[in-house]
């Protein structure tokens, strides 16, 4: 009999592969070598279909073969998912030439079982449960999390928080000196695998292709430069629109024979013998959106069911508002784009901790109909603060709003009067009078579903007509709301988005402007917003 000490996981794996008459790709041997010693915290990411579960079953059998007292808690997305690995591990022990005669399951059922030489009577060589199942009383030398990140555990912030809590509980189950292993593919923008990597976990991450290049709006006949690789895999579109485009490659340059909205160019496939271009095209056709492809095959941290509001569809800009007055006319531009109108919407809240955010957005519109989300801020504090002696308003949220009105010389501001906002317009008007600023205060009575209102943002994203200032793009709280928004739940944290949606819905269709007040001087108004004219060349 072979000495256990001289048997590595790679050897154990190859012996089983020979027994099963398998062809083994190099990547499986690389994984085995990494699993042999991944430290106390490991993350294994491979594309769909690359044998993660099979390798894990053989690995589990190997650990029991090396030490019959090794205790493993294997957690999947559900109990039934975990049971599959439990059955697979037991099957390997029954068939492997090194274990089938003396190291097989003798006690227990699929949820928890022991081999004959195990001294433990409570926890099992392999204990299989779903990630949301109760395992509080368990103990293990090794805890495995196999595809615990799925749409059913990550589709909302509440679910992601629940998953994070369950994973954090594992540290109390782990026997001191034990290890934790995470295996899977990302299913959300803030993937648990990214957090583990950032915390210092030992990671083995291999996407479908080591080289990738994404091209948007590809033109027929145009020459595009490639990097110096061989055996390119080229795909266009996603879902039912996916295809292998018509192209030619000459001296590291590619020319397409038709126009394509999206083209992905790949090289250096992980398992080229099994996953040919034709096979991968079939899988690409079955993907419902590009996020599913990117997450499940290129291992990018994106929600598999797609973002309702795709952050990548917002077009960033960094220019500020520039104004020019001449011949009694006022002109306003962002970059070289002529602005025709502006709108500001405020969704008031009490500003107290744990309540909705009191959010204010400012959106400009150019003569081409494109929108510029220029300002989005959280208004804090009491709605108004008054002087004890005079009763004049001297601070609070209304004064913060007036600062924005003054900064952009806004001619009007909309206030959502549902809930706490009912009395706010009168307070803001009083504060404007105190500050000596001319600005109309308009009221919004929203009666429809808020999610439907927010989904109006999507139409501008799909038409590449919504720009976002970099100061908003750099606000992690706003980006989190964009990424997390789910139109199928009412539990979204979406106050910033709601203020933007209100701006979009109430945006005027003004095409141009002139200064109609040629003699009257207003303190802080862009009079250019007040009367539309037809723009030359419209």
Image (cartoon, grey):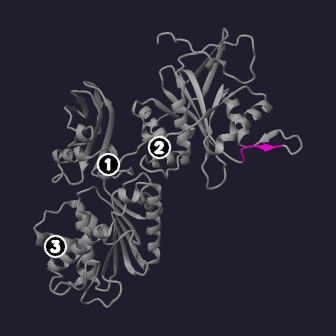
State yes or no: residue 137 in magenta.
Answer: no
N-terminal-most mark, 3 or 1? 3
Quarter residue 421 falls in: top right
Looking at this rendering, what residue extends furthest in the right direction?
389
What's the CA distance linking mark 1 and mark 2? 23 Å
- Mark number displayed over residue 16: 3
Quarter residue 517 falls in: top right
State yes or no: residue 385 in magenta.
Answer: yes
Q: Position of residue 211 (x, y in %)?
A: 30, 46
Asked whether the viewer can see residue 319, the reply is yes
- Span shown in magenta: 382-386
- Mark number displayed over residue 451: 2
- Secondary element type, mark 1: helix
Select label 3 or label 1 by which is in front.
1
Select label 3 or label 2 by which is in front.
2
- Mark number displayed over residue 228: none
Helix, strand or loop for the magenta stretch, by majority: loop
Left or right of 415, for residue 249: left
Location of the N terminus by quadrant is bottom left
What's the CA distance linking mark 3 and mark 2? 53 Å
Q: Residue at x 62, y 39 (%)?
A: 417
- Secondary element type, mark 2: helix
Residue underneath mark 1 = 292
Determine whether 347 is above or below 61 in the image. Answer: above
């Amino acid at each position: 009999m072979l000495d256990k000490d001289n048997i590595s996981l790679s050897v154990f794996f190859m012996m089983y592969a020979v027994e099963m008459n398998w062809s083994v790709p190099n990547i499986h041997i690389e994984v085995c070598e990494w699993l042999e010693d991944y430290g106390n915290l490991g993350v294994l990411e491979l594309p769909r279909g690359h044998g993660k579960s099979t390798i894990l079953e053989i690995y589990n059998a190997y650990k029991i073969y090396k030490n019959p007292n090794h205790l493993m808690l294997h957690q999947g997305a559900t109990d039934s998912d975990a049971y599959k690995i439990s059955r697979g591990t037991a099957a390997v022990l029954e068939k492997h030439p090194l274990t089938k005669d003396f190291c097989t399951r003798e006690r227990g059922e699929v949820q928890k079982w022991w081999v004959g030489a195990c001294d433990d009577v409570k926890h099992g060589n392999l204990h299989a449960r779903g990630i949301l199942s109760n395992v509080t009383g368990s103990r293990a030398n090794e805890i495995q999390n196999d595809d615990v990140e799925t749409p059913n555990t990550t589709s909302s912030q509440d679910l992601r928080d629940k998953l994070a809590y369950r994973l954090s509980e594992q540290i109390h189950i782990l026997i001191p000196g034990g290890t934790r292993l995470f295996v899977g593919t990302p299913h959300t923008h803030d993937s648990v695998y990214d957090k583990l990597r950032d915390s210092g976990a030992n990671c083995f991450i291999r996407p479908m292709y080591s080289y990738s290049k994404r091209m948007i709006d590809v033109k027929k006949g145009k020459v595009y430069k490639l990097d110096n690789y061989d055996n390119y895999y080229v795909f266009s579109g996603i879902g039912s629109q996916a295809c292998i485009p018509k192209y030619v490659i000459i001296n590291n340059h590619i020319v397409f024979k038709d126009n394509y909205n999206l083209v992905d160019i790949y090289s250096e496939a992980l398992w080229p013998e099994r996953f040919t271009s034709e096979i991968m095209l079939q899988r690409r056709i079955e993907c419902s959106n590009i996020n599913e492809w990117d997450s499940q095959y290129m291992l990018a941290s994106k929600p598999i069911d797609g973002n309702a509001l795709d952050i990548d569809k917002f077009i960033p800009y960094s220019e500020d508002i520039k104004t020019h007055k001449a011949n009694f006319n006022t002109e306003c531009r962002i970059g070289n784009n002529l602005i025709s109108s502006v709108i500001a919407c405020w969704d008031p809240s009490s500003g107290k901790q744990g309540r909705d955010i009191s959010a204010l957005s400012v959106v400009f519109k150019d003569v081409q109909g494109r929108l510029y989300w220029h300002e989005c801020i959280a208004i804090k504090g009491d709605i108004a603060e008054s002087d004890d002696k005079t009763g004049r308003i001297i601070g609070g949220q209304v004064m913060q709003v007036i600062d924005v009105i003054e900064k952009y010389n806004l001619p009007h501001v909309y206030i959502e009067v549902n809930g706490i906002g009912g009395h706010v317009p009168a307070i803001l008007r009083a504060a404007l009078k105190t500050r000596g600023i001319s600005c109309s205060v308009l009221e919004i009575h929203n009666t429809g579903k808020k999610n439907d209102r927010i989904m109006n943002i999507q139409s501008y994203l799909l038409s590449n007509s919504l720009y976002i200032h970099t100061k908003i793009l750099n606000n992690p709280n706003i980006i989190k709301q964009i990424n997390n928004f789910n139109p199928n739940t009412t539990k979204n944290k979406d106050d910033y988005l709601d203020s933007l949606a209100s701006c979009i819905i109430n945006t005027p269709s003004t095409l141009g402007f002139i200064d109609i007040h040629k003699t009257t001087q207003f303190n802080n108004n862009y009079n250019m917003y007040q009367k539309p004219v037809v723009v030359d060349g419209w």
